[in-house]
Image (tube, rainbow, N blue to C red):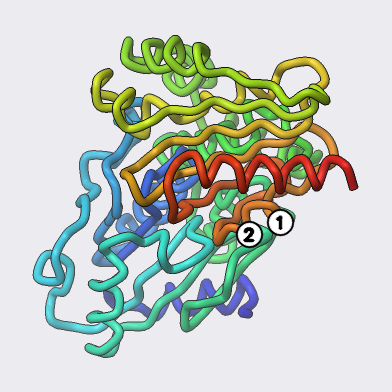
């Protein structure tokens, strides 16, 4: 593990920087990438933005979003001199998807890697690592980092950072939201963030496909006999027929979570016949990051995920039984 001061020095000394997030990027991932990258670029750094997965449409409004390369090849990011690959909000290397191979190729060419994350389940897999599970979002860490580097906030950078915190705290509703979080948000608003405009984009507008996905998911709702667990199931036939993707399904699990009495909410999505993606949520006391970890996943105490090998029904049985066991303990 490295200190944030050490991270700042690594960035200051890097001639070239590649900034990457994770597959199925969310607001914290995208906003953190852009805020850090825009600040570095304005200081004269050669910066390349990379996403291992397609950006959800709701984040296209963010300043710099059009600069992000999706799943680039080595030739598209390596400009002949070594530098630093900064990986944000990515708790395990597998979440880099196909870009992990490019990162490994860059390391063989002499590039170093730097991880900045806040997941409690994060592994220090990079050459340099800064992990703060106490931060509500990676965006909080980036704001502190920019101050150490001596970079001033402008409206674009502040908008990206506000988005990271607003999305990862569920609109400032989760227990990770602290007084320090609100003080940082106040700084961002003072730097020019249009709170209403950002909130409209990330919370109050969705493609019609997202509503169709919700309608389909609600038809599969099941609740355990004890009333403390609830889940949705979306098989591949359903998602294919609706022509929906990750961005349309993101957040649906929370509709099970809000049911009175429910502590653990789950969403099972069949990726193919051999893999099922599971979203885990809890309301008060169950640490779902530990639950997800038993299936090879991870995340936060109240929100986690896992991509689990096996047929849909077998995965469902295993995860539901494990969840009920936790609830009974």
> Mark on residue 290?
1
Residue 293 has which mark? 2
- Where's the N terminus, which quadrant? bottom right
63 up-or-down from 291: above or below: above
Q: CA distance from mark 1 to mark 2?
A: 5 Å
Residue 291 relative to residue 58: left or right: right
Residue at 58% across / 29% down in the picture? 189
Circles 1 and 2, Cβ within 8 Å, touching? The answer is yes
Between 152 and 34, the one lying in front of the other is 34
Q: Residue furthest right?
A: 329
294 vs 80, nearest the viewer: 294
Residue shown at the point (21%, 40%) measured from the top left: 66
Residue drawn where x is 35% and y is 76% of the image: 84
- Lateral position of residue 100 relative to residue 297, left or right: left
Residue found 53% across the figure and 46% down from its top:
315
Residue 282 location (% of width, % of height): 73, 36
Nearest the eye: 6 or 120: 120
Secondary structure of residue under mark 2: helix
In-image side of 39 versus 108 (left or right):
right
């Amino acid at each position: 593990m490295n200190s944030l001061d050490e991270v700042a020095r690594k960035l200051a000394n890097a001639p070239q920087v590649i900034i990457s997030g994770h597959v199925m990027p969310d607001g914290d991932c995208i906003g953190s990438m852009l805020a850090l990258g825009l600040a570095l670029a304005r200081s004269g750094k050669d910066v390349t933005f990379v996403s291992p997965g397609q950006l959800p449409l709701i984040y296209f409004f963010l300043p710099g979003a059009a600069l992000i390369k999706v799943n680039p090849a080595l030739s598209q990011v390596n400009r002949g001199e070594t530098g630093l690959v900064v990986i944000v909000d990515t708790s395990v290397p597998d979440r880099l998807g196909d870009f992990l191979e490019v990162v490994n190729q860059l390391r063989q060419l002499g590039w170093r890697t730097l991880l900045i994350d806040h997941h409690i389940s994060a592994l220090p897999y990079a050459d340099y690592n800064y992990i703060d599970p106490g931060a509500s979002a990676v965006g909080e860490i980036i704001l502190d980092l920019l101050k150490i580097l001596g970079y001033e906030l402008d409206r674009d950078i502040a908008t990206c950072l506000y988005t990271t915190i607003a999305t990862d705290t569920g609109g400032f509703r989760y227990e990770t939201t602290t007084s320090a979080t609100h003080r940082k948000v106040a700084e961002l608003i003072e730097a020019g963030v249009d709170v209403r405009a950002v909130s409209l984009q990330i919370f109050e507008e969705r493609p019609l496909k997202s509503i169709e996905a919700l309608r389909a998911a609600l038809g599969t709702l099941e609740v355990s006999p004890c009333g403390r667990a609830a889940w949705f199931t979306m098989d591949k036939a359903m998602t294919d027929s609706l022509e929906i993707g990750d961005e349309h399904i993101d957040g649906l699990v929370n509709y099970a979570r809000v049911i009175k009495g429910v502590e653990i909410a789950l969403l099972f999505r069949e990726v193919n016949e051999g893999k099922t993606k599971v979203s885990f949520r809890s309301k008060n006391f169950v640490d779902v990051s530990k639950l997800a970890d038993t299936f090879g996943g991870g995340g936060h105490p109240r929100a986690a995920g896992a991509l689990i090998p096996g047929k849909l029904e077998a995965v469902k049985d295993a995860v539901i039984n494990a969840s009920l066991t936790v609830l009974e303990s």
